[in-house]
Image (tube, grey):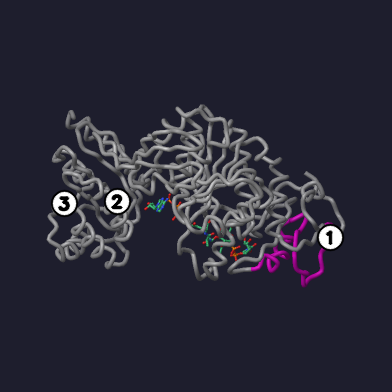
Amino acid sequence: MKLYDLLRDVEYTVVREGNPEISDIIYDSRKVSPGTVFAALKGAAADGHKYACSAIDKGAAALVISDDLDFDIPDGVAVVKTDDTRLALALMSRAFFNYPERELKTVAITGTKGKTTTAAMIAEIFEQAGIKAGTIGTLGIVYGGNTYKTDNTTPESYEIQKAMRNMADAGVKAFVIEASSIGLKASRLAGMTFDAAVFTNFSNDHIGGVEHKDMAEYLYCKSLLFRQCRNAAANIDDPAWEKITADFKGDILTYGFSEGAKLRAKNDRLLSDNGFIGVHFETEGLKNLSPDVGVPGKFNAYNALAAISAVSFFDIPDKAILDGLKIAHVKGRVEPVKVPGNYSLLIDYAHNALSMENVLTTLRQYKPNRLITMFGAGGNRPKVRRYEMGETSGRLSDLSVITEDNSRFEDVMDIIADIKTGLHKTDGKYVVVPKRKEAIRYCMLNAQDGDIIVLAGKGHEDYQEIKGVKYHMDERELIAEIIEEEGL
Ligand SMILES: CC(=O)N[C@H]1[C@@H](OP(=O)(O)OP(=O)(O)OC[C@H]2O[C@@H](n3ccc(=O)[nH]c3=O)[C@H](O)[C@@H]2O)O[C@H](CO)[C@@H](O)[C@@H]1O[C@H](C)C(=O)N[C@@H](C)C(=O)N[C@H](CCC(=O)O)C(=O)O
Ligand SMILES: Nc1ncnc2c1ncn2[C@@H]1O[C@H](COP(=O)(O)OP(=O)(O)OP(=O)(O)O)[C@@H](O)[C@H]1O
């Protein structure tokens, strides 16, 4: 594509004439190859303008800058100047990948908590309706059964546009993205108009360092999403909803348990039945539904409401909503695994005391026969984490099954001894089964009716790291092997 075609949506002035054919857009000088355009971004740690010279040395055909350069531009290199090179990068990337959003139904979710879960629910509902879906968020770029890791929850605009193009070319029809406040601030979503934008909730997070200067800025950045959407939905039970959606020019679909919500929820109750751990509620107003949501805790009723609101802007049958909400989950986060027997087995990524506290407190509300937590702790990481995890599990579990995790260069039994030190501060019962597969076997063979068993620590990971080597280890596979070996 010719440079000026690429720049068709950008406001710029020409510093050095030239309209070369552009092979790719690059924003990191180290990745420049001949014939590319280099966009100089000012970042938290560096200023891309400092690397413009090196980009030219590597063959960049054109530069997009916002500041004057302090060297003579060699002949044959086109240069344009714009106020905001991050915005220019986003607009050029859309054009370069031929506006993939035009081929996709698009949903963006913002909020402090619940983005990843809500995105998974929305994607599953689309899939249940026969519409192939792709997501971008904390888990990475996910579509067609594959996951591609990204550096950020909301990646750089170029990466988003490229992923959307790949999705559209692979037959994906619905695209769901987590819009982080930092991503919005850094124009990573600039130029796009989403079919639907959803606000989940707002609380203190991401303040300080390279993130937001204060809560006001954090709120403002989240609100930016509602300037670039055709439809909007917001959690009316969160006091920040009006401020966050203030710039939306249209009717907001409010959801929540409050009287005034357009999609009103009521009669919520925790569900625990033969391995199914979730939450049930009914809705009225916009839709009369009675969904069983397959992930635990009342907060997941809110995520489900956010998902129902989002898909209500598209022509999605109620059955797909109900089926989707029943099975949607985020891999490795309170992920249910089907097992024979009348108990629940969950895989969760909790690998520190805080996340363990969150998940175990949520599960305690289900009043299980016993709450059993199997976990280890990482080697070559602060020992305090082990003491804290031991103490938290001891306090909140009926039985702790202590095992190995990524022991790295440490002896597993030393790590287990540290966990026991923390656990001994409580009167929690425990057993030690050092080999992880054997620990899972122990949990499964000793499960009683109504137990909830959490395999904590590995989550979505499919490896175990021992002495510098990452060995394949997927807990789902281990569970399947145990079922087969034990004839369960
Ligand atoms: C503070 C921040 O947001 N940094 C992000 C930003 O990097 P940056 O622009 O600050 O990078 P920089 O190192 O200052 O460099 C500036 C420019 O010079 C270029 N450069 C640099 C060196 C060189 O030799 N040549 C060169 O051209 C860089 O490629 C860059 O374009 O742009 C990068 C590419 O998009 C991001 O990966 C990076 O995210 C870092 C890893 C990060 O931690 N970001 C966090 C704060 C973040 O974005 N978090 C949100 C929220 C997560 C949540 O909700 O939990 C997220 O969406 O992930
Ligand atoms: N709607 C919600 N309200 C409050 N807490 C929630 C909600 N949804 C999820 N959580 C809690 O936040 C954790 C993270 O959830 P999720 O990954 O869906 O959110 P996120 O917005 O993507 O967060 P992050 O950016 O931290 O990854 C969950 O494990 C749960 O403890």
- What residue is shown with label 3? 398
Q: Earlier in the sequence, mark 1 or mark 2?
A: 1
Determine if the magenta segment contains residue 74. Answer: yes
Crowd rating for badge 2 (residues with CA inside 10 Å; few <14, some 14–19, many 20+): some
At horizontal 16% and vertical 66% (from top left) the residue drawn is: 425
Q: Earlier in the sequence, mark 2 or mark 3?
A: 2
Q: Earlier in the sequence, mark 1 or mark 3?
A: 1
Q: Percent from the top left, x then y, of residue 297? A: 33, 47
Closer to the eye: label 1 or 2: 2
Q: Quarter-wise, where is residue 78 in the image?
A: bottom right
Magenta range = 47-76
Mark 3: secondary structure: loop
The quadrant of the picture occupied by the C terminus is top left
Locate residue 296 relative to residue 51 in the image: left or right: left
Q: Percent from the top left, x then y, of residue 407? A: 28, 57
Locate residue 487 relative to residue 127 in the image: left or right: left
Mark 1: secondary structure: strand
Q: Say what amino acid the circle numbered 1 marks.
A: Thr
- What residue is shown with label 2? 362
Give the distance between the C-alpha atoms of the residues marked 1 and 3, in whole angstroms: 68 Å
The quadrant of the picture occupied by the N terminus is top right
**Ligand 2 has an atom within 8 Å of the beta carbon of the residue at disc 2:** yes
Q: Percent from the top left, x then y, of residue 416? A: 20, 59
Locate residue 213 relative to residue 377 in the image: left or right: right
Give the distance between the C-alpha atoms of the residues marked 1 and 2, in whole angstroms: 56 Å
At horizontal 18% and vertical 43% (from top left) the residue drawn is: 443
Crowd rating for badge 3 (residues with CA inside 10 Å; few <14, some 14–19, many 20+): some
- What residue is shown with label 1? 13
